[in-house]
Image (tube, rainbow, N blue to C red):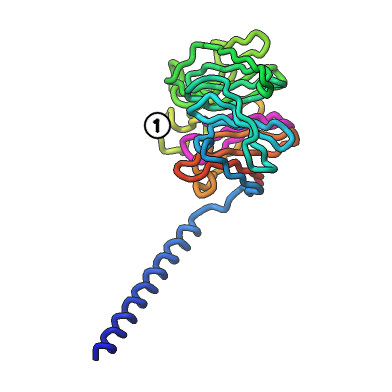
């Protein structure tokens, strides 16, 4: 009798487990039906070491190497895609919230969130030199994006959070590489009421929060990573917003950095958020 009761209990448990698995799979199937097909393909992935868990900016160096910064320490990490290892560390400054990096010749420019730009000349050599360029921007603007505009010999800084006096736009300011000065008027304005952003159910200043900015080496289009949500926005060379791509959260945990190789390969970095940070090579359809 006891064996029969035990058998019935086992059957009941197995049946319940089977029902739970069926329901779980059904729910996931319905979710997948609602999820739009990805407009991109990930064609390469590199996991980063723990010291780069909070990677915030990346820059292509050539020869399968990428320079990385993270938002706590003043260190440039040279990561080799072929070996998946950090092969060089350059301590250019002390503790700080460093957000992006661009390299012009032998000089690296690193953006801190308060708008200060660190110029590290001969950064790959033992006798490098660091110079800090202060300006009128502050932590309230929270700058995370730095792009090198080669054609106009300037760096471009995008406001992430709040513009100085107006919530209807976010400025992209230009830093001249000739006189090392930041212009007081924005070179471009990201219109928060743009038709591409109007359907976003959020406060005006949160409709677009640039976390990285890159310029395509061939066509000059701007690629903007949105820190508000996993999203990539492409604009033309006049900063007119043209296309928005949704980035699946399963692929992009926290997209913070963007860079292009000379031939137009696109790389996006993600912070770890408790898991390993990574660099993804992404191809958009």
Task: Please give left or right for residue 279 compared with residue 249 in the image.
Answer: right
* Element carrying mark 1: loop
Looking at this rendering, what residue extends furthest in the front direction? 126
Q: Is residue 176 above or below residue 148?
A: above
Where is residue 81? Give x, y as percent.
Answer: 67, 41
Task: Please give left or right for residue 1 compared with residue 19 in the image.
Answer: left
In the rendered image, the quadrant that contains the N terminus is bottom left
Where is residue 280? Give x, y as percent.
Answer: 61, 43
Where is residue 144? Give x, y as percent.
Answer: 52, 26
Question: Alpha-carbon neighbours of circle 1 within 10 Å: few (<14), some, or many (≥20)?
Answer: few
Choose between 183 and 81: the one closer to the eye.
81
Choose between 171 and 15: the one closer to the eye.
15
Looking at this rendering, what residue extends furthest in the top direction? 179
Q: Is residue 257 above or below residue 108?
A: below
The stretch drawn in magenta includes residue 87:
no
Choose between 257 and 81: the one closer to the eye.
81
Q: Is residue 47 above or below residue 240?
A: below
Q: Which residues are magenta?
A: 210-235
Circle 1 is placed at which residue position? 203
Task: Please give left or right for residue 113 compared with residue 203 in the image.
Answer: right
The stretch drawn in magenta includes residue 211:
yes
Q: Residue at x 48, y 23 (%)?
A: 95
Q: Main secondary structure of the magenta part?
A: strand
Q: Could you say which quadrant of the image residue 265 lies in?
A: top right
Q: Residue at x 75, y 36 (%)?
A: 263
Where is residue 53? Give x, y as percent.
Answer: 51, 38
Q: Residue at x 53, y 32 (%)?
A: 56
Looking at this rendering, what residue extends furthest in the bottom direction? 1
């Amino acid at each position: 009798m006891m064996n029969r009761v035990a058998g019935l209990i086992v059957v009941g448990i197995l049946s319940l487990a089977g029902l739970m698995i069926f329901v779980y799979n059904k729910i996931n199937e319905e979710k997948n039906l609602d999820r739009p097909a990805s407009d991109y393909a990930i064609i390469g992935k590199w996991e980063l070491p723990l010291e780069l868990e909070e990677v915030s900016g990346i820059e292509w160096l050539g020869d399968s190497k990428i320079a990385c910064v993270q938002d706590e320490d003043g260190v440039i990490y040279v990561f080799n895609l072929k070996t998946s290892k950090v092969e060089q560390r350059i301590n250019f400054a002390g503790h700080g919230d460093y957000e992006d990096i661009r390299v012009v010749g032998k000089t690296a420019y690193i953006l801190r969130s308060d708008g200060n730009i660190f110029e590290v000349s001969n950064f790959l050599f033992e006798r490098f030199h660091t110079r800090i360029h202060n300006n009128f921007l502050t932590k309230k603007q929270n700058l995370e994006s730095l792009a090198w505009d080669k054609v106009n010999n300037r760096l471009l800084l995008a406001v992430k959070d709040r513009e100085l006096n107006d919530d209807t736009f976010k400025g992209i300011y230009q830093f001249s590489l000739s006189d090392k000065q930041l212009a007081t008027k924005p070179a471009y304005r990201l219109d928060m009421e743009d038709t591409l952003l109007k359907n976003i159910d959020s406060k005006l200043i949160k409709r677009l929060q640039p976390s990285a900015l890159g310029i395509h080496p061939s066509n000059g289009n701007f690629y903007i990573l949105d820190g508000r949500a996993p999203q990539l926005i492409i604009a033309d060379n006049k900063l007119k917003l043209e296309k928005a791509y949704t980035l699946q959260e399963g692929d992009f945990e926290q997209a913070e950095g963007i860079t292009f190789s000379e031939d137009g390969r696109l790389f996006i970095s993600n912070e770890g958020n408790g898991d390993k940070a990574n660099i993804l090579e992404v191809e958009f359809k």
